[in-house]
Image (cartoon, coloured by chain):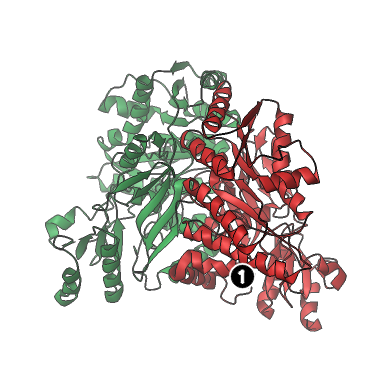
Chain colours: A green, B red
Amino acid sequence: MDEHALAELTDVLPDGVVVTDPITMEKYRFDRSQDTGTGTPALVVRAEDAAQVQAAVRWAARHRVALVPRGAGSGLSGGSSAVDGGMVLSLERMRSVEVDADCQVAVVEPGAFNAEVKEAAAVHGLWYPPDPSSYEFCSIGGNIATNAGGLCCVKYGVTTDYVLGLDVVLADGTLVTLGGKRIKDVAGLSLMKLFIGSEGTLGVVTRAVLRLVPEQAARSTMVATFPTVDAAARAVVAMRRTMRPSMLELMDQASINAVEDHRPRGLDRSAGALLVAQSDAPGTARTEEVALMSATCEAEGATEVFVTDEAEEGEMFVEARRLAIPAIEAQAALMLEDVGAPVPLLPDLLAAIGEVAAAYDVRIPVIAHAGDGNTHPIVMYDPTDAESEKRALAAFREVMQRAIDLGGTITGEHGVGRMKKELLPAQLGPDVMALTRRVKDALDPEGILNPGAVL
Amino acid sequence: MDEHALAELTDVLPDGVVVTDPITMEKYRFDRSQDTGTGTPALVVRAEDAAQVQAAVRWAARHRVALVPRGAGSGLSGGSSAVDGGMVLSLERMRSVEVDADCQVAVVEPGAFNAEVKEAAAVHGLWYPPDPSSYEFCSIGGNIATNAGGLCCVKYGVTTDYVLGLDVVLADGTLVTLGGKRIKDVAGLSLMKLFIGSEGTLGVVTRAVLRLVPEQAARSTMVATFPTVDAAARAVVAMRRTMRPSMLELMDQASINAVEDHRPRGLDRSAGALLVAQSDAPGTARTEEVALMSATCEAEGATEVFVTDEAEEGEMFVEARRLAIPAIEAQAALMLEDVGAPVPLLPDLLAAIGEVAAAYDVRIPVIAHAGDGNTHPIVMYDPTDAESEKRALAAFREVMQRAIDLGGTITGEHGVGRMKKELLPAQLGPDVMALTRRVKDALDPEGILNPGAVL
């Protein structure tokens, strides 16, 4: 990086905001996907407010420097992998959360963690529903960038359903305010929605107005054990026909055993699959809904059904489900999938994943936000064995292709990033790719925003 | 219209699709806003399928003919007013509705009425929630074009929350398929959301995949009478803090009396305002929620609170609320507002509307989707009195400005169309307008799609 050029930036930003020493920069190179293709940035800017974000973007635009926005670095698709010679624009210092209880909104800076928004809302008896499994260490900015989902979205929807307003710094440094504290607003194009899920390729979010709802009612939890993944998947399809569980998660045998190896939770290691479902229907309706869930699981061949109204006991099973990824991470290197299909095709998708695992001789434990048809096959490999990694990568791609063949998606909630972009044209087709390119070019004509991600 | 050019189109489309006789075309000139600035089209194309839409758009692009897409013509902002010498592209013949009960979606052509989707869903025990007051005669295409709301969106959200997939014909005639039957999908930019609420300025929707949910539970209805609009508005704010009613509507004294004049429903003509609220909480929770609603209204000064668990009796009040616009239409010419504000500012917005009515010496009855802070002030005037119309127009504009001043919006659910576009820059500001223009130019570089609407 030209020192003259760099000085232009350091002159206008406070000490400590711009970082260029390689040791400090190292931790800004990777997200959680550990993308091996990540680059080495020339600088990291740790912005403290929107004005500093604007200064950084303007500087990058002037010098044609690639700029990768970054929240908590918990992304799973390489969406914030650094670019060689580029800038990483970290939003980690912008973390304020203000709750307006009368409006039932939280006004949040992008670096705030999802859990921090939930906590601030709870103080006022309010709730921010979106709950990625990583909610304790993922940022709202990243949630918005990927339109993140989670466990409760089977009933409560995903991030985009809760964003009422965004401040966005555009590629030329202009700050625009879109939406606001109004619940309904159709004045002008839906530009705000365009930025949600855009993975830092269209602008940098500096503030969000998030919708809150009254706190969730008490939940009952049902855990059902099935002899096969297929039987569990069929029970999911049946349940989705008649009720709205507030959670409907699946773990296959391999992920159950990984959790038991990692941190024993008393799960049945011999089960072919496990469903963890919850109901938060109010009053006596909850008992009825859970009874209906249980009956449906039994009719679909569940060998054991356990129900608890105790919050802590229920949370133990949910936690076991959330533990699956860390548990498998502890065993091997992994490539995390996020494929989805229309709900009735969930059994077919799970069967296809099993076929791919067999064909490529790789282990692919599966957990799933089953009620949404969204699965996380976890392709395991030995990073010291090039052959193993090669097979894993081929399987990773094949799983995406199989999802596409079923009318599904290569990513339900993690984003395309850099890990999945090769398969994006196969899903969207050339006309949608061309339209995507036109929108990208209109908003970022110089291509400085997160180049190499998505497109 | 050049006959040679016209023949290019009639040659490729079946008889009866292209209409040029002035008498038949007359009914395609206006939407329900009766926009006096509407034009006289050169032709109307009543497309029967997506291929015919493509042919019409390609022809319009080749000959640089302005093209106004049109659904049922029930729009309230002049969004489908005809353009002089242009084409009206009517989707009224594309009305198929297919329900996929296993996927819980309806695959719908744009001309299908909202009520037809609800009916088709109900056969399978499913429900399509968005419910504009015009649901019996408005089309899904128009609902998508305006991101329409309605009465139940206070709990269930608006149109965009239920669109999973769209087929769209772009300005050059390309047909793109966005989204699908997958519930969660973040592969690529949120292009689908961009078309929702775009009022025909970015493309023509030819098919939608709409999300359905299990049928709504039984509802109880509460009707509360207040001495003033302000007291009623304060009760709304209080209710929204602690519960999620499935409907929360307001009528002021003038709209109550208009309904009683038009079709007597036994409403209290002396009431300052009326709230009609519903709860659809399951089981015993419903009784509790309605009791809490009633107590809240009483605490905020309601003079009478009436509760019924009878569906028919409840529907009578809801129907009275829906009758308000036709009742006022029967009395005078009107300009229908759609302004909104953050919910806690609802009392201020209603007060501002009263001030505008007094200042401009016009009658402005108000009905409101109060729980969302979205109001419909109805500016009445005598169409035979130019002075009255002038005052009404000034009041119409002033109401929008007052909503903007409160951090609100000029349109919550009807769209900008041609009636409200003058005030759009005042709400969005120059930077957002410039961004809007960039997106519009990227998608419709020749400006053939609904010119004069929104922008």
**Label 1 Cα neighbours within 10 Å, binned few <14 / some 14-19 / many ≥20:** many
Which of B435/B16 is in front?
B435
Q: Tell me residue A368's x, y (percent).
A: 43, 35
Residue A204 appears in which quarter of the rendering?
bottom left
The chain ID associated with circle 1 is B
Q: Which residue in the structure is indicated by mark 1?
A: B171
Question: In the picture, residue B173 is in which quadrant?
Answer: bottom right
Q: Residue B350's spot in the image, x, y percent?
A: 56, 51
Residue at 71 percent of width and 53 percent of height: B139
- Residue A405 in sight: yes
Q: Which quarter of the image is occupied by the C terminus of chain A? A: bottom left
Instruction: Judge left or right: residue B103 versus residue B320.
Output: left
Query: Could you tell me which secondary element the residue under label 1 belongs to?
Result: loop
Question: Looking at the image, can residue B323 be seen?
Answer: no
Q: Quadrant of residue A359?
A: top left
Instruction: Using the image as rendered, state which of residue B366 and residue B325 is in the foreground.
Output: B366
Depicted B73 relative to depicted A362: above or below: below
Name the residue located 74 percent from the left edge and 59 percent from the top edge. B73
**Is B32 on the left-hand or right-hand side of B376?**
right
- Give the amino acid at mark 1: Ala
Image location (x, y in percent) of residue A197:
43, 54
Q: Position of residue B224 (x, y in %)?
A: 62, 34
| Quadrant assignment for the N terminus of chain A | bottom left
